[in-house]
């Protein structure tokens, strides 16, 4: 393949503060926090815009069409730019894999809902923009009233503020020994004292609220009942009446709420309080895919305009951090050594032409430094190789475990995305620096990524030649010292 234009620049790093899931009025997204409170027509217009899919035809600077977001999601790319590599990047680097996991589930859910021909689809009507706007205004009105009723300690309600959150608070319920100091009113129904609900989830031990191992007396209860209990608790906490259970896909929606939406969910999305209540209000009414409209738009925007460009920028780097630092040090050393040689030759009685020999070291040093600045090692690039990622190094020794982890990351309703307890973390930390610099390598299969790296290497070489020519001209023009 040929080269990209020499004016090519890799995609710029996009900060999360610039592309946020919520509460960013200037982020270019139709989030709940942007909904107007007074002008209902303007709010309706914004809500109708959210029905349209995120514009996938707009290209991002520095990303060729062959590496676009849609290409990666559809499986039209090769390693290291596949959807699995994208998922690994979000898990181990950006730590926001729940966005992609929820997005992949939603795409599949929309297809399955449209293909379903069951009679109960009539029980799941579309969540219209008008209904969404009404729910938004209701939530904002409740929050405004709550803010007005909040006691102010500066006006004399000091006692209320002092005892807030304690057993002495007015109207408080007795506190059980529950994790995170949660009161019984915060626990799911069936776990409070005096409850007769035999299907309620028992309180967890202090080791964590999301304990994976339940006591033996509750092992026989079905997971569907657990998800239903958690979803009901989420609706109750938001002040919403739990929905009917005869709607289509209601059990799956309960799992989505328990996995992504409710507080302390294992893959909780980064939603504002308004967005969380709005989507729960919609899901209490229907299981139609349009109920997720309020959150799927900002999530997809974050994936397209923040996570995807950063992933491509990260994939361009063919060396690990230790190798890149080593390459930068090598480039600086070559530049300094060549400069010292040029100075010595200038002092000697040798002819001016010998001073041009320093240009060889300048070209090599400057090109190496520029490439390393962009995360590339010129030696690895010459072979079109890349370093194996730390979480891939020990696959051959524990292949089954790693393969299981990869499958769980694509499981829509799996556990959390934490990786700190994986065996490779400690083993890689114990790896000495020399081994990290000369770690195992693998060939880059994606041709467009090799094309990008070739272009960057040529750009580095051209810049090095120009700068070396300037330095050579300066040293050749300087009169000789004739010292010895």
Image (cartoon, rainbow, N blue to C red):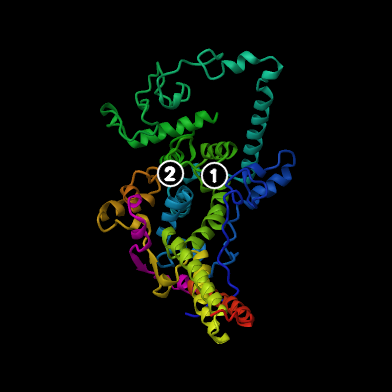
Q: Is residue 258 something one can see in this rendering?
A: yes
Is 230 in front, or is 416? 416
Which stretch appears magenta? 428-451
Q: In this view, does 444 lie above or below 172?
A: below
Disc 1 marks which residue? 291
Disc 2 marks which residue? 249
Residue at 38%, 34% in the rendered image? 210
Q: Mark 1 falls on what kind of element? A: helix
Total numbered labels: 2
Is 239 in front, or is 159? 159
Residue at 35%, 60% in the rendered image? 434
| Residue 248, magenta (yes or no) | no
Query: Which numbered disc flags the more N-terminal residue, 2 or 1?
Result: 2
Q: Is residue 239 above or below residue 395?
A: above
| Residue 446, magenta (yes or no) | yes
- Give the image location of residue 466, x and y in percent: 59, 78
Q: Is residue 374 something one can see in this rendering?
A: no
Side of 235 relative to 143 (left or right): left
Q: Is residue 202 above or below residue 15?
A: above
Dot 2: within a 10 Å radius of its alpha carbon, few (fewer than 14), some, or many (20 or more) residues?
A: some
Side of 444 relative to 165 (left or right): left
Residue 389 lies in quadrant: bottom left
Residue at 58%, 64% in the rendered image? 60
């Amino acid at each position: 393949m040929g080269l990209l234009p020499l004016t090519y620049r890799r995609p710029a790093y996009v900060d999360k503060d610039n592309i946020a899931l919520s509460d960013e009025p200037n982020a270019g997204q139709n989030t709940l926090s942007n909904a107007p409170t007074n002008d209902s027509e303007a709010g309706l217009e914004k809500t109708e815009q959210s029905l349209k899919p995120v514009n996938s035809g707009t290209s991002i600077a520095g990303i060729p069409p062959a590496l676009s977001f849609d290409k990666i999601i559809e499986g039209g790319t090769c390693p290291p730019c596949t959807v699995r590599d994208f998922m690994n990047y979000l898990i181990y680097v950006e730590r926001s894999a729940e966005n992609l996991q929820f997005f992949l589930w939603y795409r599949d859910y929309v297809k399955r809902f449209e293909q379903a021909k069951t009679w109960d689809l009539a029980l799941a009507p579309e969540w219209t923009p008008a209904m969404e706007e009404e729910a938004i205004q209701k939530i904002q009105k409740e929050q405004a009233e709550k803010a007005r009723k909040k006691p102010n300690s500066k006006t004399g309600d000091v006692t209320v503020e002092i005892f807030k959150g304690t057993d002495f608070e007015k109207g408080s319920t007795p506190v059980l020994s529950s994790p995170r100091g949660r009161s019984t009113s915060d626990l799911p129904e069936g776990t409070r004292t005096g409850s007769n609900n035999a299907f309620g989830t028992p309180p967890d031990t202090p080791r964590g609220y999301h304990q994976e191992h339940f006591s033996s007396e509750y092992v026989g209860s079905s997971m569907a009942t657990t998800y239903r209990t958690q979803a009901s608790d989420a609706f109750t906490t938001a002040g919403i009446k739990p929905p009917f259970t005869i709607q289509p896909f209601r059990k799956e929606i309960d799992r989505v709420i328990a996995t992504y939406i409710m507080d302390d969910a294992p893959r909780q999305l980064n939603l504002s309080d308004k967005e969380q209540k709005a989507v729960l209000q919609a899901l209490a009414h229907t299981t139609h895919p349009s109920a997720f409209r309020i959150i799927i738009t900002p999530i997809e925007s974050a994936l397209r305009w923040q996570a995807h460009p950063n992933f491509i920028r990260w994939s361009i780097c063919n060396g690990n951090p230790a190798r890149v630092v080593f390459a930068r040090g090598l480039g600086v050393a070559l530049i300094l050594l060549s400069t010292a040689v040029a100075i010595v030759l200038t002092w000697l009685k040798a002819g001016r032409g010998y001073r041009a020999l320093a240009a060889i070291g300048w070209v090599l040093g400057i090109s190496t430094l520029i490439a390393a600045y962009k995360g590339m090692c010129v030696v690895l690039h010459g072979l079109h190789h890349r370093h194996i990622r730390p979480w891939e190094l020990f696959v051959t020794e524990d292949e089954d475990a790693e393969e299981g982890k990869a499958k769980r990351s694509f499981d829509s309703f799996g556990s959390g995305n934490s990786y700190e307890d994986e065996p490779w973390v400690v083993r890689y930390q114990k790896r000495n620096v020399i081994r990290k610099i000369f770690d195992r390598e693998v060939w880059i299969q994606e041709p467009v990524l090799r094309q990008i790296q070739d272009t960057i290497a040529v750009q580095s070489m051209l810049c090095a030649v120009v700068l070396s020519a300037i330095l050579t001209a300066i040293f050749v023009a300087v009169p000789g010292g004739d010292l010895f």
